Amino acid sequence: MTTMRCSLCKKKDATIHYTEVVDNALQKIHLCEACAAEKGINIELPFSFSDIMSALTQGLQALQAGGEQAPATPTLSCPLCGLTLAQLVKQGRLGCQQCYTVFDRALRDIVRSVQKTPQHVGKHPAGTHSGQTAPLRIAELELALAKAVAEERYEDCAPLRDELRRLKSSAEAAP
């Protein structure tokens, strides 16, 4: 694997890689930390990367050691690239797109240990309803409505019903 040189100084190895759209054209930019700082690019993460790596390592080691979250077969491997659980623990990287399916349970457990929930609860683009798609939100509202009816909380039913109607009509009107 070859390392890329900084697009600006062309001397140091690039450690920051990002894509920029300029005049409707994608432009890939590779910078060393010094040039990125000089350009005012914030390279600080909003979370502790060491915490994520620590949780990843602990989760993978627990899986390999046969902890309670271990898959049914200790020799679990990807049929496409051949990556084994032991190799995943050692490398900390998946081998191909199929690995996401093969190691799904292990990855979910690790993400849950880092993020506390497997669903996104952070910021969402403006104009979206919590970043959810309409069908997912409709399903949530239907469950909430059924629960409110079962618990005889009728004062909560009307707003849920109204939002359900609004979402269903806008989903039907969408192309």
Image (spheres, grey):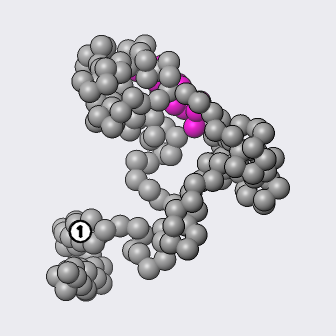
The residue segment tinted magenta is 52-63
Frontmost residue, 159 versus 130: 130
Q: Which residue is mark 1?
A: 135
Residue 153's spot in the image, x, y percent?
A: 26, 75
Residue 138's spot in the image, x, y percent?
A: 24, 71
Q: Secondary structure at mark 1?
A: helix
The verdict on residue 65 being magenta is no
Q: Residue at x 35, y 18 (%)?
A: 84
Frontmost residue, 45 versus 71: 45
Q: Is residue 133 above or below residue 84?
A: below
Quarter of the rendering containing residue 73: top left
Q: Residue at x 22, y 82 (%)?
A: 174
Residue 124's spot in the image, x, y percent?
A: 48, 68
The amino acid sitting under disc 1 is Pro
Identify the main secondary structure in magenta.
helix
- Tell me if residue 109 can be seen: yes
Quarter of the rendering containing residue 130: bottom left
Quadrant containing the C terminus in the rendered view: bottom left
Quarter of the rendering containing residue 148: bottom left
Frontmost residue, 15 versus 76: 15
